[in-house]
């Protein structure tokens, strides 16, 4: 992990950035109990929700400003840094008044550029670190745009939090991890610290260690985990919160990955495997190019016969056949489906271009 990314933020970071605490600050006693347990376990950062943007009215929506006083007391007693989520300028103003050490923008807020801009404007002239959670949908442009709005406001201590994406599909997790999106964010912004929020990805406490370890394997810079002294009694997201003991145990059992190895045997073997992957990728791209040439010819024939570009029955036949073949090759159904959908989208695009050009509409 790259400790130097956090040096000018003023945070004591050992190997990874760790923030833990309740989904919601519920009482002064609860906040202090959590903070003391985390401090005793060597954790340096207390997180807690003060304002809770709930999906439906009538749910617990946080204690508001008085919770900041509880967190401030916890900081003074334990030495922990403190942070919370902000969703509007009034939240920012209250947090700045109490001198919070870090703020973050939640998934619902990062989805709305107007809200992000309002927060960015409220933060102008400050140097507080701000983390941006991914939007609800897997829109990397929206995620990057939120970060850029803060940067354009003059903020320099920025980072991102991956908390998964909403999905209509039944799945193991509460929010789809969709790891390719944060990986792509890292490609676009390689120096940006990237934190994982396994609590919101999982939605279940017993899955958090799996996702936390996967984040470490993917070289994330840290974790933000929801921790409560008595999870079953939590007023929000009870199912996804760990006890302090469970959290500290999980952290101690994490295996930290490294980007490089100095072992000559490893480097030689990896070099050979990478060469093989490069060669196969070249072959795959060549085959895809040939496939698209055939697709264009099919488009010409369809245009001449006045046949629609999309052939639903043929497309369903392709999907059923390719998934069956992929399964026999130990490829997951989801992977094959996504691959074929991408190929099909490009094929449709090429055939539409062929139709327009053939009709002389360009």
Image (cartoon, rainbow, N blue to C red):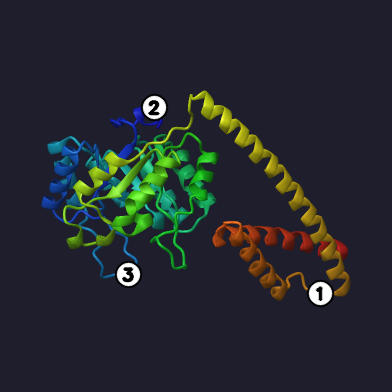
Q: Position of residue 138 (x, y in %)?
A: 50, 56
Disc 1 crowd, CA 10 A, few/some/many (<14, 14-19, 20+): few
User: Circle 3 sits in a helix, a strand or a loop, which is it?
Assistant: loop
User: Circle 2 sits in a helix, a strand or a loop, which is it?
Assistant: helix
Q: Which mark is residue 307?
A: 1
**Residue named by callout 3:** 56
**Residue named by callout 2:** 4
For the question of whether residue 8 can be seen, the reply is no
Disc 2 crowd, CA 10 A, few/some/many (<14, 14-19, 20+): few
- In this view, the residue in front, 313 or 353, is 313
Q: Earlier in the sequence, mark 1 or mark 3?
A: 3
CA separation in Å, label 2 and label 1: 60 Å
Which residue corresponds to the image point at 52% horizontal and 54% vertical from the top-left? 139
Q: Nearer the viewer, mark 1 or mark 3?
A: 1
In the image, is 84 to the left or to the right of 354?
left
Q: Position of residue 321 (x, y in %)?
A: 67, 67
């Amino acid at each position: 992990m790259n400790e130097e990314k956090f040096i000018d933020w003023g945070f004591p970071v050992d190997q990874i950035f760790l923030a833990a605490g309740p989904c919601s600050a519920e009482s002064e006693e609860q906040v202090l109990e959590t903070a003391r347990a985390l401090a005793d376990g060597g954790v340096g950062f207390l997180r807690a929700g003060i304002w809770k943007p709930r999906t439906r009215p009538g749910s617990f929506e946080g204690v508001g400003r008085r919770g900041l006083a509880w967190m401030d007391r916890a900081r003074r007693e334990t030495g922990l840094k403190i942070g919370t989520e902000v969703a509007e300028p009034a939240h920012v103003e209250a947090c700045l008044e109490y001198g919070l050490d870090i703020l973050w923008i939640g998934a619902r807020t990062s989805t709305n550029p107007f809200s992000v801009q309002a927060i960015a404007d409220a933060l102008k002239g400050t140097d507080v670190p701000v983390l941006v959670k991914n939007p609800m949908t897997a829109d990397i442009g929206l995620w990057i745009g939120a970060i850029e709005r803060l940067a354009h406001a003059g903020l320099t201590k920025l980072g991102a939090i991956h908390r998964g994406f909403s999905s209509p599909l039944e799945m193991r997790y509460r929010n789809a991890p969709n790891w390719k999106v944060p990986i792509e964010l890292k490609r676009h912004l390689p120096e940006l610290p990237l934190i994982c929020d396994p609590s919101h990805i999982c939605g279940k406490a017993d899955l958090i260690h799996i996702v936390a370890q996967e984040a470490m394997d993917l070289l994330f810079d840290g974790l933000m985990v929801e921790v409560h002294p008595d999870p079953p009694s939590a007023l929000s997201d009870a199912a996804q919160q760990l006890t302090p003991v469970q959290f500290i145990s999980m952290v101690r059992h994490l295996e930290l990955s490294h980007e490089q190895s100095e072992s000559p045997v490893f480097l030689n073997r990896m070099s050979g495997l990478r060469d093989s992957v490069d060669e196969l990728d070249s072959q795959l791209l060549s085959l895809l190019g040939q496939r698209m040439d055939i697709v264009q010819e099919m488009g010409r024939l369809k245009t001449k016969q006045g046949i629609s570009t999309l052939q639903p029955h043929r497309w369903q036949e392709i999907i059923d056949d390719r998934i069956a073949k992929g399964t026999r090759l130990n490829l997951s159904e989801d992977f094959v489906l996504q691959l074929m959908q991408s190929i099909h989208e490009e094929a449709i695009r090429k055939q539409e271009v062929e139709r327009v050009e053939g009709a002389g509409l360009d």
